[in-house]
Image: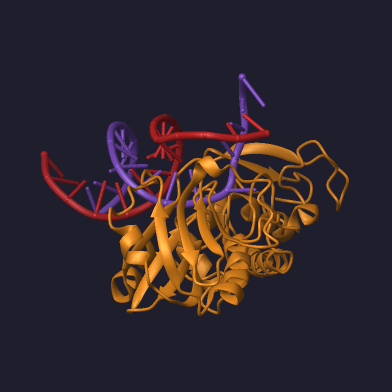
Chain colours: A orange, B purple, C red
DNA sequence: AAACATTCCTGCACGC
DNA sequence: TGCGTGCAGGAATGTT
């Protein structure tokens, strides 16, 4: 579910509400996530102070006291919620509250993940920073390192579809299925175009469209297509701004022809065959 | 009830 | 042949 804009929106909320808080108790109800949680995770979390909340790609990084980091990935259906007064828990099924951290102000930080495709790992800061999960990631799409010449170089000679390339976290980190469709619509490029055949002018439009879509989505608190909720239990607001994702058969906002849906690399992809070449 | 916002692994094809 | 790389397909799972 969560792509870069959702995780970044979450990061901003959590940074405002968690920094300085101390974890006074932790409980692990279910260890079977994508990989089993460490047996001593609850113990390791207890008494830690949260000193910062950062993001890399779709990973959330909680800086803890003792030069440690709690790395969290939400997979398809995960959420990290800060529950206290004003928290809307109407969406959540407590059966999937896998990790619960009680904080020193009486609130709780809860990891909930129905499908359990997510990841949670605590370690020494240096080890997490150089872990296999983070080490191979490509540049952040909103950084200066993601530019047309870079993308063109990574695409050279590649036969895979441009949409697959953009969703390859080693090429650029944080773009997922929803925003890949959206940015390619803005760039006027069909998702199934072979990456090696995309022109320089198109790479320039793709890079610009990536920054625009992700920035706007962050500004709207991310997209809730199905189940994403932020740390307060609230959905994102970018859904109403989606141009093509989930709009199969509906009119393109630009030319009024029907938006089509095709499988590209096993993932549903939406585009306008008139506006995108 | 088919589809799903993600990642990881396997196996095959290809090229040097 | 042997090895590395690219690519497609599938699996993990619960919900709607």
Between residue A182 and residue A273, name the one nearer to us: A182
**Total residue callouts:** 0
Q: Position of residue A5 (x, y in %)?
A: 62, 63
User: In the rendered view, would you say A101 is above or below A159?
Assistant: below
Q: Position of residue C13 (x, y in %)?
A: 45, 34
Any part of residue A138 in sight: yes
Which residue is painted at 58% across and 57% down in the image? A3
Q: Position of residue A66 (x, y in %)?
A: 32, 79
Left/right of residue A84 with respect to residue A242 in the rendered view: left
Any part of residue A132 in sight: no
Write down the quadrant of residue A229 in the picture: bottom right
Which residue is painted at 33% across and 75% down in the image? A125
Q: Position of residue A160 (x, y in %)?
A: 49, 48
Which residue is painted at 72% across and 56% down in the image? A188
Q: Which residue is outermost to the right?
A: A256
Between residue A277 and residue A168, name the one nearer to us: A168
Which residue is painted at 52% across and 40% down in the image? A95
User: In the rendered view, would you say A54 is above or below A107?
Assistant: below
């Amino acid at each position: 579910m969560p792509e870069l804009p959702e995780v970044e929106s979450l990061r901003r909320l959590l940074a405002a509400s968690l920094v300085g808080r101390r974890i006074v108790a932790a409980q692990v109800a279910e260890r079977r996530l994508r990989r089993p949680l460490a047996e001593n995770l609850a113990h390791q979390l207890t008494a830690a102070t949260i000193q910062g909340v950062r993001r890399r790609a779709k990973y959330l990084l909680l800086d803890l006291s003792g030069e440690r980091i709690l790395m969290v990935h939400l997979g398809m259906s995960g959420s990290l919620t800060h529950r206290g007064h004003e928290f809307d828990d109407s969406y959540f099924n407590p059966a999937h509250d896998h990790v619960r951290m009680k904080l020193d102000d009486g609130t709780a930080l809860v990891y909930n993940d129905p499908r359990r495709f997510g990841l949670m790992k605590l370690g020494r800061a240096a080890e997490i920073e150089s872990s296999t999960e983070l080490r191979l990631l490509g540049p952040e799409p909103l950084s200066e390192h993601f530019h047309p010449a870079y993308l063109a170089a990574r695409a050279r000679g590649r036969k895979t579809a441009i949409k697959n390339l953009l969703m390859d976290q080693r090429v650029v980190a944080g773009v997922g299925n929803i925003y890949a469709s959206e940015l390619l619509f803005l760039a006027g490029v069909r998702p199934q175009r072979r990456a090696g055949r995309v022109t320089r002018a198109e790479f320039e439009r793709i890079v610009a469209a990536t920054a625009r879509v992700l920035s706007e989505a962050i500004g709207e608190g991310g997209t809730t297509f199905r189940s994403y909720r932020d740390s307060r239990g609230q959905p994102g607001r970018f859904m109403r701004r989606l141009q093509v994702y989930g709009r199969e058969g509906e009119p393109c906002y630009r030319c009024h022809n029907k938006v089509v849906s095709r499988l590209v690399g096993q993932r549903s992809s939406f585009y306008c065959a008139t506006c995108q070449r």
